Image: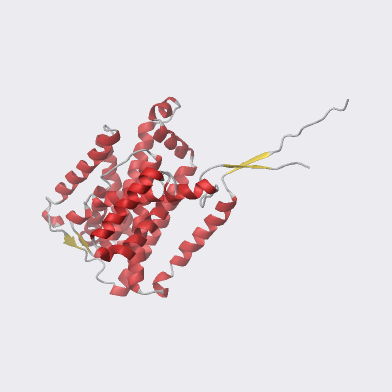
């Protein structure tokens, strides 16, 4: 009687997949190539792409907070306004260089987000969503009480006046590109880290995460602050692009609605989903903006269809057919058979 020996195929666990080994370098090359865009196309196109980059930042920051942290805020417009007003104060009134003023404006928004978190985190679920909206309105009312901030009429940004029109558009684009890269890299490293695993556990079940040793409030607060910083820098870029800040437009709840729309369409809880959602929304806006109410009706219909039938968004549809990733944020197992 002959004994047979079975050998177990070795398993290799890696963060890198076949697609991410190609996708990550391709993304790096793409963003490096985008640096030269102002030299290659009309300035109107550069302004349009700047708007797209701002949308990517906003969608990524909202997804980081809601898709990974489980905090579905409807008040992120507070940090857009704070970042925009912070930039005007830093650049115009304090004379700080515009390139340094953008991250500082984001830091101001982050500090205020940290303080707001102690109030907002007393609320959960729908109460948290509505509560953040109310807080954003309170922030708007406070801002409009200061004569130095233009009261309710807003104020203009003069720090960009030394730049001619062409250079100003290019500078705002380069700043937006840099912040976009920073936002995506931050999301990737947070999700890859052990903190990211704990954050996902908090999103799925805060009680179970706490019993497993995760500091729930610390994890949620850190993500809330990071999201506030990124959203604040996006607001600063909006101020640079428009050269004016107005409370009614910057603190409008429409910004949060757009963030939710982009993340739902693209795919919540992924790095790639918000980018796809931002591109889809930007494309629809560019094509259908002249159609007035029809444009808004179409956006609403698209959002309803995806919310009801495609919960994972466009990225979820892609993942159904084949495991595909651009950034190495998960784990993959490969089996090697022995001869």
Look at 52% across and 55% down and name the residue there: 24
Q: Residue 58 appears at what percent x and percent y?
A: 34, 52
Along the line of sight, the residue nearer the viewer: 259 or 217: 259
Judged left or right of residue 293, residue 10 is right
**Could you tell me residue 47's position as x and y percent?**
33, 67
Q: Count numbered badges in the picture.
A: 0
Judging from the image, the colouring scheme is: secondary structure
Residue drawn at (32%, 71%) of the image: 44
Residue 8 image offset from top left, x and y in percent: 72, 34
Q: Could you tell me if residue 108 is visible in this image?
A: no
Please tell me which residue is depicted at 37% across the width and 59% down the height of the picture: 53
> Which quadrant does the N terminus fall into?
top right
- Left or right: residue 188 versus residue 46 is right
For the C terminus, the image quarter is top right
Please state if 36 lies on the left or on the right of 330 as rendered: left
The outermost residue toward the right is: 1
**Occupied quadrant, residue 39:** bottom left
Q: Is residue 140 visible?
A: yes
Q: Is residue 304 above or below residue 287?
A: above
Residue drawn at the location 47% of the way across and 66% of the way down: 33
Would you identify the image quadrant in which residue 202 lies? top left
Q: Return the x and y of residue 297 as percentages of the image width and height.
A: 27, 55
Q: Nearer the viewer, residue 169 or 330?
A: 330
């Amino acid at each position: 009687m002959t004994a047979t020996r079975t050998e177990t195929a070795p398993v290799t666990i890696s963060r890198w997949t076949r697609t991410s080994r190609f996708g990550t370098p391709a993304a790096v090359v793409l963003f490096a190539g985008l640096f030269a865009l102002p030299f290659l196309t009309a300035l109107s196109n550069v302004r349009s792409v700047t708007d797209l980059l701002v949308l990517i930042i906003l969608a990524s920051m909202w997804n980081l907070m809601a898709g990974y942290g489980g905090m579905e805020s409807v008040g992120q417009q507070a940090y857009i306004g704070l970042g925009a007003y912070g930039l005007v104060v830093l650049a115009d009134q304090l004379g700080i260089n515009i390139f340094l003023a953008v991250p500082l404006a984001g830091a101001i928004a982050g500090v205020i987000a940290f303080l707001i978190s102690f109030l907002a985190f007393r609320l959960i679920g729908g109460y948290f969503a509505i509560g953040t909206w109310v807080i954003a309105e309170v922030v708007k009312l406070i801002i409009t009480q200061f004569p130095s901030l233009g009261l309710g009429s807003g104020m203009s940004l003069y720090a960009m006046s030394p730049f001619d029109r062409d250079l100003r558009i290019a500078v705002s684009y380069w700043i937006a590109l840099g912040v976009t890269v920073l936002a995506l890299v931050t999301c990737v490293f947070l999700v890859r880290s052990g903190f990211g695993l704990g954050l996902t556990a908090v999103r799925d079940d805060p009680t179970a995460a706490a019993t497993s040793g995760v500091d729930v409030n610390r994890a949620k607060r850190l993500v809330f602050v990071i999201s506030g910083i990124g959203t604040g820098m996006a607001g600063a870029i909006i101020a640079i692009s428009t050269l004016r800040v107005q409370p009614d437009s910057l603190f409008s709840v429409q910004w949060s609605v757009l963030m939710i729309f982009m993340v739902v369409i693209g795919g919540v809880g992924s790095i790639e989903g918000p980018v796809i959602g931002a591109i889809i929304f930007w494309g629809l806006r560019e094509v259908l903006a002249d159609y007035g109410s029809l444009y808004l009706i179409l956006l609403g219909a698209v959002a309803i269809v995806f919310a009801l039938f495609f919960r994972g968004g466009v990225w979820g549809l892609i993942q159904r057919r084949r495991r595909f990733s651009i950034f190495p944020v998960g784990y993959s197992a490969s089996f090697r058979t022995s001869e």
